[in-house]
Image (tube, grey):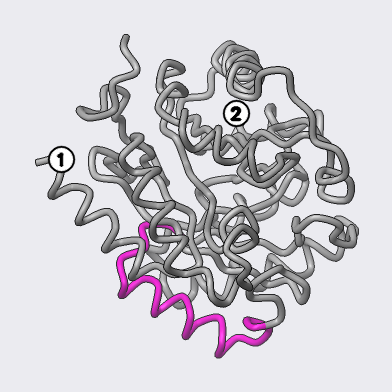
Amino acid sequence: MTASHGNQKNTKSLNCKGRLIDLGIPKVMGILNTTPDSFYDGGRYADAAAILEQVQKMREEGAAFIDVGAYSSRPGAKAISEAEETKRLLPVVDLLLNTFPDLLISIDTFRSGVARKCLEKGACMINDISGGDADPNMFETITSFQVPYILMHMQGTPQNMQERPHYENIVTEIRESLAKKQFQLKDMGLNDLIFDVGFGFGKTVAHNYELLQNLDLFHELQCPILTGVSRKSMLYKPLGLSPEKALNATTVAHTLALQKGSQILRVHDVAEAVQAVKITQLIRS
């Protein structure tokens, strides 16, 4: 298979609770942080009304999935216990599915216990920033529920990942790391695997741009690629901006990622990401 991304050779569908989600046209995943200390929207969605209003807005703007997280993974963020993470997440999953029964909820967690409880409540996907490294039971949990699994690459932990990131050849090393885990999960019988190269997670600004430039090379692994660059420091720091001012830079990065064949964008701003998808599709067709 070639790494040609123009015709999306590794296009596939994801099975989310019996619904087939076609990735032939890239999809947008809206971010819902229920953490008080996230880098961009910390504390903004702390009560039921604010959560429902934001999710309704993201749905109307065209989000295919909502990614709910309760553990801040910004560099140097304070670790919280599994009990605290569970306490923050479960009521939100209940609230969302009671209000929007057809909502496709992804859970942003690296703990298999948290994943299990949320999947039992009706979540349909797990987004693991540690790619299975933080919890030896994660792969088994994912496989037993047979849900799509977003496997991200991270060097280190959120607490130390930005201290001294180092690679001999970042693209080769991350591809090998993902391929090794892909083989393991395939052997365990997992159907739906999605890769995230982990922009900003144990990478310098230069590393991030090298990954973005070579994102199409990851298609050789024949798994959908999720891109998470929304309002990240790789965008706002070189421009001397804050996360709040980085929407335009985010759209530029999303467009580049889509041109490299990314099939899912994980974003804070759904409407603008959907526009980037539509314009990129017009170029393609």
Decide if residue 30 is on the left or right side of residue 198.
Answer: left
Tell me the quarter of the image containing the N terminus.
top left
- Residue 216 magenta: no
State the image coordinates of residue 132 (x, y, percent, origin top left): 72, 32
Is 158 placed above or below 63 here?
Answer: above
Please say if 4 is above or below 79.
above
Which residue sits at x=73%, y=71%? 35
Quarter holding the C terminus is: top left
Helix, strand or loop for disc 1: helix
Q: Main secondary structure of the magenta part?
A: helix
- Residue lying furthest bottom in this view? 49
Query: Who is closer to the viewer here, 10 or 240?
Result: 240
Q: Nearer the viewer, mark 2 or mark 1?
A: 1
Taking the spot 49% from the left edge, 74% from the top edge, the residue there is: 98
Find disc 1 in the rendering and name its residue: 284
What is the C-alpha distance between the residues marked 2 and 1?
A: 35 Å
Q: Give the image quarter of residue 207.
A: top right
Circle 2 residues within 10 Å: few <14, some 14–19, many ≥20: some
Which stretch appears magenta?
Answer: 44-65
Q: Amino acid at mark 2?
A: Thr
- Label 2 sits on residue: 143
Residue 19, percent from left and from top: 32, 46
